[in-house]
Amino acid sequence: MAGGRRQAPPREDVLAAAMEMIAERGLEKLTMAALGREVGMSSGHLLYYFGSKDELLLRTLEWSEGRLGAERGRLLTRAAGARERLDAYVDLYVPDGHRDPHWTLWLEVWNRSQSAAADADARDRQAAIEGAWHRDLVALLAEGISRGEFKSVDPDRFAARLRALLDGFAIHVAIGLRGTDRAQVLRHVHEFLADSLLADA
């Protein structure tokens, strides 16, 4: 309608634009004003939708995790051995490199959640993200054990330890710690899995 109010873009488009800005310009350039210019909305309108920048970042992380979760589901349900699918899980988990946008966002959201003002709902939503990765890994480990591909370990305990290892290495890659790169990390993890999990041939 001529002279009518311009319709706001779908929320998913806003989240995709936020993620693209993080990837292209870095998290420090993602302001409400800059994002508003990108999607044709005022910063006030964005605040109306999301309430705060913290909520915008968490929603963007959830959106990104949804895409990763779909990819993880495809990798883990394909017709392949448990070891091959575990390698795919690790490959998806580890950042692509320094300033990987998903990991940059993940670190920022967790850092902000340490403040006294962070609400329990936000913490629960972050825990739900972690829980999905953990449950998928536990199920894959249990399957590999039942098929004789993996040693008889406690799947839940091993998953907790493996994810702690992956998180530590992933943070090193994401922040660009000198002497640590993705290829090196993948070699360390594969050696650890060969030593501690793979059944003897």
Image: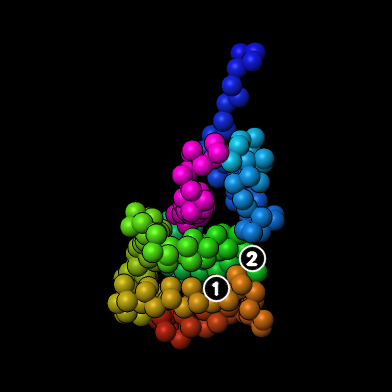
Depicted 191 relative to depicted 106: above or below: below
In the rendered image, which quarter is residue 173 located in?
Answer: bottom right
Magenta-drawn segment:
44-73
- Between 83 and 17, the residue placed more toward the observer is 17
Residue at image coords 48%, 73%: 167
Residue with the mark numbered 1: 171
Query: Distance of mark 2 from mark 1, alpha carbons?
Result: 10 Å
Residue with the mark numbered 2: 99
Badge 2 density bin: few <14, some 14–19, many ≥20, Cα 10 Å = some
Residue at image coords 66%, 83%: 179
Q: Report the quarter where the C terminus lies.
A: bottom left
- Can residue 132 be seen here? The reply is no
- Report how many numbered discs are placed on residues in the image: 2
Q: Residue furthest top?
A: 2
Asked if residue 105 lies in the magenta stretch, the reply is: no
Find residue 98 and report its horizontal and vertical position in percent: 65, 69
Find residue 156 and report its horizontal and vertical position in percent: 31, 72
Depicted 45 relative to depicted 144: above or below: above
Amino acid marked by disc 1: Ile
- Between 184 and 124, the residue placed more toward the observer is 124
Relative horizontal placement of residue 77, taking residue 8 as reference (left or right): left
Relative horizontal placement of residue 116, taking residue 27 as reference (left or right): left
Q: Choose the circle earlier in sequence order: 2 or 1.
A: 2
- The local secondary structure at tag 2 comes to loop
